[in-house]
Image (tube, rainbow, N blue to C red):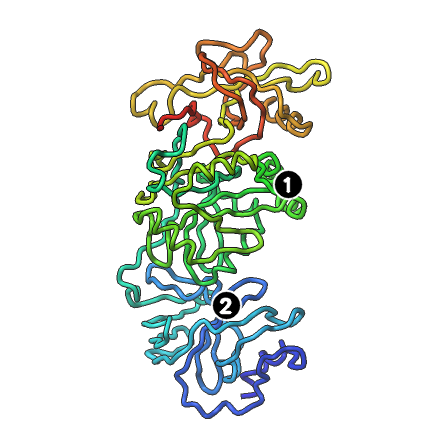
Amino acid sequence: MAKKLGEYKRKRDFEETPEPSGNGDSGGQPGGRFVVHEHHARSLHWDLRLERDGVLVSWAIPKGIPPDPKTNHLAVHVEDHPIEYIDFKGEIPEGNYGAGEVKIWDQGTYDVLKWRDKEVMVVFHGERLQGKYVLFPTKGKNWMIHRMDPPADEGREPMPRDIKPMMARLAERVPDKENEWGYEVKWDGVRAIAYIEGGRVRLQNRNMRDITQQYPELRELGRAVGARELVLDGEVIAFDEEGRPSFGRLQHRMHLASESAVRRRMSDIPVVYAIFDVLYLDGRVTIRLPYEERRGLLDELELRGSHWQTPSWHRGEGKALLDAAREQGLEGIVAKKLDSPYEPGRRSVCWRKIKAVQRQELVVGGYMPGEGGRTGRVGSLCVGYYNMTRAEAEERGEEQRLIYAGNVGTGFKEADLVKLGKLLEPLRRDTSPFAGRQPKKGAVFAEPQLVVEVEFLMWTRTNTLRAPSFKGLRDDKDPRDVVIEKPDVA
């Protein structure tokens, strides 16, 4: 027995750690017990331990026990543990091997069907873990664990992998039948779908691009969720000095290319994930459920942490919330029909955004060279919008046309002008990308690949922006999907 536990003892200082030393009586148990520990170490993982020949034969499983036979999980064969460890839970102090909190995720008994050097097949009888599993080696200490039975939950659905966010239509005012709607603050950030499984988070923006590496602080959400499987919808936001969401401030995090650059900015520009919908929950796709029911499920999850929050929503009270948004200088509110399902990829009439300030995404088709203090740099951006989306053009068999909407010459910081100059230089072209009305003479034209967000006073009768101000670059929107946004619902 001492030989079996030699590696376990070499890795630990039992004057420092509360873990059992393995010097006690094993209890004379005949075998057949198991425990699964949820181990919040440097990297969250689950430890499967099977009682066998006086010790606990152990595997570390980074993504937890697979609930579905369609998915195999890595299981790293680690040192045997003493039998007393089957009841261990507690905090392993910092500086010790495996430092972090250890919880009992499940325990019970198991039956052995096969136990060989290259195959361990068992049937678990626990509260959470039940059914037939097999473990088999692949290379070195790396094994795989596979569920052989159908899912314990017969109605279990696989987690969807690529959900395009549902969008809201612009509306002039709060809906007439206020009490048939739920209301939320409109957050001024970057839309992100979060896929969480095995304690890991993957973030995807509305362009279906992976943005996980840009926001490392949100990885802790996976550790907080633990073994639960979730798909969440929300907005990544940064706050200004007055505690208001600031898209301009978020710009300094959105476009960083290297991990070291992201780490440098994390402390002075932290982000928060504002969660407002749950699309998948522990084996159930929830997008078909009414909004009110989905919000109830989300609230029950109590997802609140240092870098994520579940902001409140309001049944009715739309006008009051819009007034409050105006007073606090927020972008506006979103009204969501209480009985509406989630419609991936659609800009639905069941979600309506009512703005306290006017905002519009626009495509950059060129710029006017700067004068005076801006000599040698961008003076103003020539911006426009397409007459129809890419999908509409394909459906109709027509060419898209980029419509000139005016120039944006205010709202820039020095860093914005430098960045825009660098981005526009390789995009220069000889001819105008705009159809019909054109910018003033002297414009430098560019391939229409950059998307910017602007704040403005109003649209004129000729669909030109009045008093536009630059708010930031958007890399989460396909330029070919930028169309003019005017209220299309009352």
Question: Horizontal and vertical percent for residue 355?
Answer: 47, 31
Distance in Å between CA atoms under marks 2 and 1 = 55 Å
Q: Nearer the viewer, residue 351 or 278?
A: 351
Of the 4 image quadrants, the one containing the C terminus is top left
- Residue designated by label 2: 140
User: Going 56% across and 85% down the picture, which residue do you hit?
Assistant: 22
Name the residue at the right extreme: 373
Instruction: Give the numbered dot on residue 120.
Output: none
Image point 65% across, 69% down: which residue? 94
Residue 177 in percent (x, y) is at 33, 37
Q: Quadrant of residue 402?
A: top left
Residue at horizontal 35 percent and vertical 42 percent from the top: 179
Q: Amino acid at mark 1?
A: Glu
Amino acid marked by disc 2: Gly
Q: What residue is rendered at 67% in x and 81% in y?
A: 15
**Could you tell me residue 458's position as x and y percent?**
49, 20
Mark on residue 242? 1
Which of disc 1 and disc 2 is earlier in sequence? 2
154 over 191 or under it: above or below: below
